[in-house]
């Protein structure tokens, strides 16, 4: 009994140690971000990103129709609109205060996604060590870390995409209506932030269809098959409803405006120079192998 007690205590110590290391890592990461978020300047897109939120805010709360003539109306505002609402709630007027708040919130979204990424790596590789290692790789990348303060498009997209992959795994594992709804909401956020997020529903539907076929064949369990179909219907419905809900420009013409946004983003209107393979190439003339 004494040997068994000693072994149990050792396992308990290991659990406590790895929890302490994990908590310490995220505490250091958080306080590092809080210490340096004021050190970053404003990127070229930030003012325009705020404008997309402001114009949607005006449409929702003041009936301003300028949204439908605004050049960037085809951008989703699932992140920018809440920031404008927070700006109004806090009564921020000084541009410095406004953009520092936006930098802080962008970092906090990234911070939350790194926590999810830890659990994702830990789940896949069955080890907390891989969870910490994966999280470290994500955090110490200079480009990613810097962008996590001022890039409220790509870094927020990366962050929510991580969450979407995690909720997808939970859905495939648990196969419950609650997780179908949760994953539908997160998928809608991903699509809203960057329309390339449409990949998430494609992955999800393909995997759920695979699950439906498996459930239909395996021992002819019809109730399981019906549950699979119900999961797909609920997921698609939740994703569609919340995509429209989070995107005011879609409210009046959901389908046609969504298709227009998708087409616009496949032929993007920016024609600035891009440095690629040692040459500056207009964005409209980039070769197919540019990623």
Image (cartoon, rainbow, N blue to C red):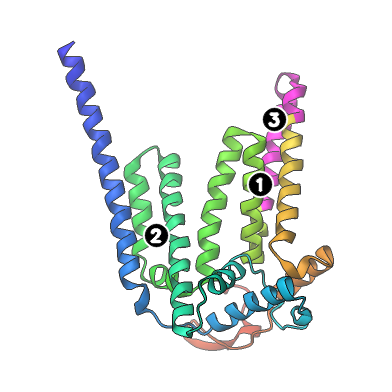
- Seen at 53% across and 80% down, the residue is 46
Nearest the viewer among 240 and 87 is 87
Q: Quadrant of residue 168?
A: top right
Residue 84 inside the magenta-drawn segment: no
If the image is split into quadrants, where does the N terminus sit? Answer: top left
Residue 98: horizontal and vertical position, in percent?
49, 78
Q: Specify which label sits upstream in the sequence, 3 or 2.
A: 2
Report the magenta stretch's main SS. helix
Residue 200: horizontal and vertical position, in percent?
64, 53
* Other residues around mark 3 within 10 Å, as few (<14) / some (14–19) / many (≥20): some
Can the viewer see residue 64 in this picture? yes
Residue identified by numbered label 2: 138
What is the C-alpha distance between the residues marked 1 and 3? 15 Å
Residue 115: horizontal and vertical position, in percent?
42, 51
Residue 217 inside the magenta-drawn segment: yes
Question: Which label was assigned to residue 214?
Answer: 3
Q: Specify which label sits upstream in the sequence, 1 or 3.
A: 1
Where are the magenta residues, as a range? 201-226
Helix, strand or loop at label 2? It is helix
Question: Which label was assigned to residue 252?
Answer: none
* Other residues around mark 2 within 10 Å, as few (<14) / some (14–19) / many (≥20): some
Residue 6: horizontal and vertical position, in percent?
17, 21
Q: Is residue 215 above or below residue 154?
A: above
What is the C-alpha distance between the residues marked 3 and 2? 35 Å
If the image is split into quadrants, where does the C terminus sit? Answer: bottom right
* Other residues around mark 1 within 10 Å, as few (<14) / some (14–19) / many (≥20): many
Helix, strand or loop at label 1? It is helix
Q: Specify which label sits upstream in the sequence, 1 or 2.
A: 2
Residue identified by numbered label 1: 204
Q: Quadrant of residue 208?
A: top right
Position of 83 with respect to 99 (left or right) is right
Foreground disc of the pair 3, 2: 2
């Amino acid at each position: 009994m004494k040997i068994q007690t000693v072994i149990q205590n050792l396992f308990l110590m290991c659990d406590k140690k790895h929890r302490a290391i994990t908590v310490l890592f995220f505490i250091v990461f958080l306080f590092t971000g809080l210490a340096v978020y004021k050190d970053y300047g404003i990127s070229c897109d930030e003012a325009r990103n705020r404008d997309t939120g402001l114009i949607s805010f005006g449409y929702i709360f003041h009936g301003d129709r300028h949204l439908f003539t605004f050049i960037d109306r085809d951008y989703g505002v699932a992140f920018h609109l809440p920031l404008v609402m927070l700006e109004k709630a806090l009564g921020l007027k000084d541009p410095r205060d406004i953009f520092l708040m936006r930098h802080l919130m962008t970092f906090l979204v990234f911070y939350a996604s790194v926590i999810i990424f830890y659990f994702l790596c830990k789940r896949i590789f069955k080890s907390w060590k891989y969870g910490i290692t994966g999280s470290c790789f994500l955090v110490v990348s200079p480009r990613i870390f810097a962008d996590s303060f001022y890039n409220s498009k790509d870094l927020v997209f990366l962050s929510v995409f991580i969450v979407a992959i995690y909720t997808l795994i939970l859905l495939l594992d648990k196969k419950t209506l609650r997780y179908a709804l949760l994953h539908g909401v997160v998928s809608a956020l991903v699509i809203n932030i960057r329309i390339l997020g449409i990949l998430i529903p494609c992955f999800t539907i393909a995997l759920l269809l695979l699950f439906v076929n498996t459930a239909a064949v395996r021992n002819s369990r019809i109730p399981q098959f019906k549950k699979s179909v119900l999961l797909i219907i609920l997921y698609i419905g939740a994703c569609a409803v919340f995509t429209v809900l989070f995107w005011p420009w879609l409210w009046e013409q959901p389908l046609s405006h969504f298709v227009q946004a998708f087409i616009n983003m496949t032929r993007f209107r920016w024609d600035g120079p891009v440095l690629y393979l040692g040459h500056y190439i207009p964005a409209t003339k980039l070769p197919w192998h540019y990623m």
